[in-house]
Each structure stands twice: as C-alpha cells, then as structure tokens.
Image (tube, rainbow, N blue to C red):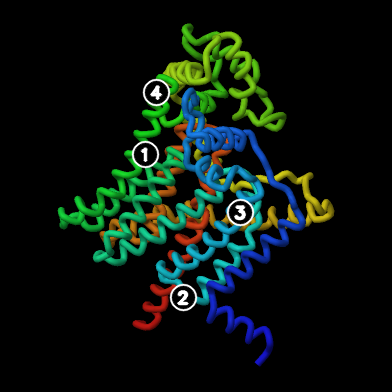
Amino acid sequence: MKQSSKIWIWCNDNPIKTIIIIGVFIRIIIAILYGHITLYPDSKDYINLAERLLNFDLAGYQGERPPGYPLFLSINGISNIITVLLQSAMGVCTLIFAYKTLILGGAKRQLALTITLILACYLPSIFFEFAILTESLTLLIITLIFYIFFGIIQNDKSETKHYIWLALLCGYLVMIKMFYIYLACLLFMILIFHNHKSIKTIISKYLLVIIIPISIFLGWSYVNKINTGYFTSSTFYGFNIAQNCVWFSENTTPEYQEIGDIYASYRYDDPKEKEVAMTIWEAYPELVAKTDLSFPDLSKKLYDYSIATIKKNPIKYLEQVSISWRDFWKTSLYWEAYSFSVPQASNVILYICYMERVLLQLVKMIFVLLIPYNIFIAFRRKVIAPPMIITIVVFAASILQAFATYGTNSRFSYPFEILMITSVIINILEYTRYRSKQKATS
C-alpha cells in the first residue's frame, strides 16, 4: 500500500485530529507570512467598550456597539495577541463543528472530511481571525447554533439541556450583533412548525430559545435608554439607514434640506473614486458642526431624515435596497495587503484568495438558484429539512440587512457561508440519492 493511501486511511479514521492538524498548520503558515494584526475603525469601538466593561463603568456610554464582542476582548485582557490566538482556535473549532454538521446533514465521513479540509484552506476566513472584528466569533457561534438545532430537529426527544445551550448561544449571538434577534425568532417559529402538537414542549423548551435573546435585546436597549435617552439596541441606527439614502440624499423634505445638501456634497458620483456607502461618515464632522448634536441625537435626527427622504423617494430606495441585497451575496477579504512580514508572499496569497473567492461566489450563486427548489420541496413534503432551514435563515438575513443599511453588506453573509456550502452539498447528495433510486427501480 502506498504511503499516501496509508495517510488518507489514517485521516479517515481520525477526522477530528486531521482537521485540527491541517487547521493549525495553515494558520501557523499565515501567521509567519502575514505576521500582522489588523485594526479597523470598528475595532476601536469594541476596545473602548471592552475597557468600560473591565472597569464596570457604562455611565455615559453612547451606545455605539453591543457588549458581546467587547466582553470577549475584556475577558482576554484586551490583548490583541491573545485575541488573535483565541480567534484562531475558534476557527479550528468552527471547522470541527462544520464537519459534524455535514454528518448530521447526511454526508458520509469521507465526503464531510474532504469538504471540511477544503474549508480549512479558505484563506479569507483566516484573515478575519487576524483582525479585531466580530466575524470569527460570530461564525463559531452560528455554526454551533445550527449544529445543535439540526440535532434537535432530528430528535424530538432532545433533552432540555440542548435547548438551554441553543438559547444561550442565540442570546450571546444577539449580544455580539443585535441584528441576530431575527435568528432566534425564526428558529423559535421553525421549532413550533416542526412540532406544534405538544403545548408542554413549547412552554418548557421552545420558549427558552426566544426568551433569553429577547431579554438581552431589551436589556441592552434599556441600558442605552439610561445613557442616551433612546431605547435602541445601537445608536448607529440612524447612520445605517441613512447610508441607503446616499444616491438621493438631497431630494428630501424642506425640514431636512440642509442635512440632505451636506450629505450630497460629500458624495462621489464615480463609485470607483471612493466607497460611496461611507459618504455619511465623511459628512459626519460637518453635520456635527452644523447641528451641534451629540452622536445619539444626530443618529435620531438622521433616522428622521432618512424616513422622510425614503417616503419621498420610494422607488429609488427600493433600487438601493436591491443593490444592498445583491452585495450581500458577494465575498469578503479583510486584510492589509502591504503589511505582510514576508512581502514576497503578498501576491501569491492574493491570487490564492482571488481563486478561492471566485469558487465561493459560484457556490453562493448555486445556493441562490436553489432557493425556489428548497421552498418547493418543503411545501411538497411538508417537512422543513436542513437545506430549507438554512434557506429561510440566510434569505431572511439578506432581505433584512438590505432594508437596514448599505455598505459592507457582504460582511452580513460571511457568518452564513459555511451553512450555504452545507446546504448546497446536502442538495447535491439528495439529488444523487434520488437518481440512484430511479436507476434501481428502472
């Protein structure tokens, strides 16, 4: 027997060890070649809140960010190095549970291992681990949620502890990004649809899945109410929705004309010249100077301006929403290309990332094309299978984020990319089994 065959047999016999070895090896290579921790404007906000949490002092906090990721930073002492090490470990754990989720979806061990090892080589995901951003933590939590959720769906007699874990994970996910409150609501509704006959189960188990996340959502909104005067999950809300008004910002009501004109004056008509979605942030200093408002008050003002402007331009708003929806399905790469500790590796890594992103883009396109198919199968069989669950969750995310904001929309889809791949794989497996049965009966 060839040595390569022996190695592959060992890998199949020890899938978890194989995933850990490959995952750690690739991360060590990137750490040597890149050797850099990437900080973004978002990172500063997270670190600022982490410092407040360490000091047990939220007095006067302006409510920009939810506490989930800053809590993670504060636990590791706000050390960038420790954060990256932990995020790298999270990346490996994510791969392990992605493998287990594929098994739950009906993939054989060998296929599940092969797919997982391919995922382990997806470099853009690793570069997120080298950034002080929420993506790596969010990806792990979402992967864990769906691993547990699929286990519950497949076993109606799941123990209460599984529901508690699901509820806690959904709650912490909401702490990381309040946007994900929708996920807890959807999972709760899917559970009821899956088994709505047992009132006892609904009360004793299913309600946990939604009560904990909603309590966290309302609790943090109340903290912001105390500090800013606004009952909101984030004081970014006005800026976020204003980003959807960028192309018709000046066409507003007389009450908000000054804001609209300032906003429009910073807009670049050529999208290639600068990222148009960030125009509101370029206009921010002048808006503050003109209005003399605090960040929370200006956010409320921009929210009111956005609602008035959208009402006046509903067609243009829907056109912008469609652009945001389209951008959701793109792929992300967050790194600093000129910060490699081994500069010669930069171009090689860039080409690898480009090819990987093209392949992932193709998978995403297949996923979108399969959405009508999964809906049809669910109605026909009257069963919500894993591909349909993933379809509901991801499609809902794509719609909600598109209505909420414009800019970096692909970051909303990143935590769902493994799920999209899982869904496509399960669809292919189901089709293969269907064809095999047809051949056997013919």
Q: Which residue is mark 4?
A: 226
Q: Earlier in the sequence, mark 4 or mark 3?
A: 3
Please tell me whether mark 4 or mark 2 is closer to you in this view. 4
Which quarter of the rendering shows the N terminus? bottom right
Q: Which residue is mark 2?
A: 108
Name of the residue lying farthest toward the bottom:
1
Q: In the rendered image of this protein, does residue 401 appear above or below residue 385? A: above
Q: Which residue is mark 3?
A: 125
Q: Earlier in the sequence, mark 1 or mark 2?
A: 2
**In the rendered structure, which amino acid carries the disc numbered 3?**
Ser
Label 3 secondary element:
helix
Disc 1/disc 3 C-alpha distance (Å): 28 Å
Q: Earlier in the sequence, mark 1 or mark 4?
A: 1
Disc 2/disc 3 C-alpha distance (Å): 25 Å
The residue nearer to you, when weighing 421 against 13, is 13
Residue drawn 55% across the image and 57% down it: 90
**In the rendered structure, which amino acid carries the disc numbered 4?**
Ile
Structural crowding at the residue carrying mark 1, measured as other residues with C-alpha within 10 Å and reported as few (<14), some (14–19) or many (≥20) = many
Q: How many marks?
A: 4
Q: Which residue is mark 1?
A: 216
**In the rendered structure, which amino acid carries the disc numbered 2?**
Lys
